[in-house]
Amino acid sequence: MIRGYGTAVLSVLGALLISHWPFLHLESAPVSLLLCAVMFTAWSGGVGPGFLATVLSALAFYYSFLPPVDSFTAKPSEIPRFLVFIVSALFVGSLSVAQRRTTESLRRTRDHLNETVRELKQTNEALGKSEAYLAEAQTLSHTGSFGWNVSTGELFWSEESFRIFGCDQTQKPTVRLVLERVHPEDVHLVNEALAGASQHGGDIDLEHRLLMPDGSIKRVHVLGHALNHEVGKSSFVGAVMDITAMKNAFEEIQTLKDQLYKENLALREEIDITR
């Protein structure tokens, strides 16, 4: 702040010295020099220093350039000229202060915008990492996620959901596409589950088979939770789990148990016969 007031004094003093410098022949341009001093001070220092520069410039103009010069007893006919100078100085100072405030506001806005962009970049990076971790976790667990808006019919799949259903990610997921993948013998089960969920807003818990384009069969477990239970306007989020490997392993274990049971039974019969 002190620096700003010092600038006011020095700028007005400098304008006076330059206007009286005989080598520059600026005796006829004192008003411009003093107004420049006011403008520079108001722009660099703000309202207080700008007002001080205006007062000092007015005194300097009155004393040094109004007849009789070097006196504070100007002719009455020069008073209008003095008032015009004061109004001009105040106007120029006000414009400079307004420009300073606008510049500072723009600078603050720029800094705030840069900070917002930096935070947004960090958030996007964190979100990207989270999405990558989630996608990897879904791949490892063979679990995809989905969203279903009943009223619009829109369906949203994660990357793993596309892989489970054997669809390209350029395809738009729809209920019709899901039904095309469902095993023909399980279509009625899926239709009943979807109808019950859309009509009553209940949760979905269903196991069914998928018939893939290459003829292979997958088994999936679908869980869906209703976010809005209003009839006809329900929306669901859920997960679809590929349980094919688990089911196949269970069936293999069951087959092995049945085989062991039969072999054990046959062995007992042989023992009974030998007795």
Image: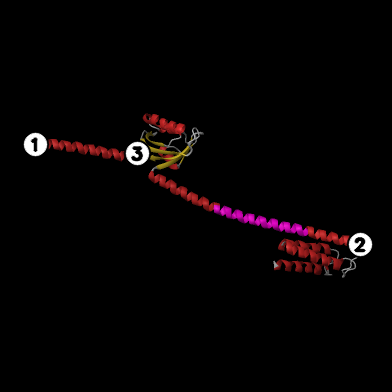
- In the image, residue 68 sits, relative to residue 236, either above or below, namely below
Residue 75 % position (x, y):
91, 65
Mark 2 or mark 1, which is nearer the start of the sequence?
A: 2
Residue numbers of the magenta segment = 92-119
In the rendered image, which quarter is residue 252 located in? top left
Q: In the picture provided, is 102 more to the left or to the right than 203?
A: right
Tell me how far mark 3 sits from mark 2, CA to CA.
Answer: 105 Å
Density class for disc 1 (Cα within 10 Å; few <14, some 14-19, many ≥20) is few
- State the quadrant of the N terminus: bottom right
Disc ID at residue 274 = 1
- In the image, residue 184 sits, relative to residue 95, either above or below, namely above
Chief SS of the magenta region = helix
Find out whether the residues at labels 1 and 3 contact each other: C-beta distance under 8 Å.
no
Residue 71 % position (x, y):
88, 70
Label 3: which residue? 244
- Residue drawn 43% across the image and 32% down it: 196
Q: Which amino acid type is marked by label 3?
A: Thr
Q: Is residue 188 visible?
A: yes
Q: Which amino acid type is marked by label 1?
A: Thr
Find out whether the residues at labels 3 and 2 contact each other: C-beta distance under 8 Å.
no
Residue 229 % position (x, y):
47, 36
- Residue drawn 39% across the image and 29% down it: 188
Q: In the picture provided, is 197 more to the left or to the right than 73?
A: left
Secondary structure, mark 2, is: helix
Secondary structure, mark 1, is: helix
Density class for disc 2 (Cα within 10 Å; few <14, some 14-19, many ≥20) is few
Closer to viewer: mark 1 or mark 2: 2
Label 2: which residue? 77
In the rendered image, which quarter is residue 237 located in? top left
Q: In the picture provided, is 256 more to the left or to the right than 94?
A: left
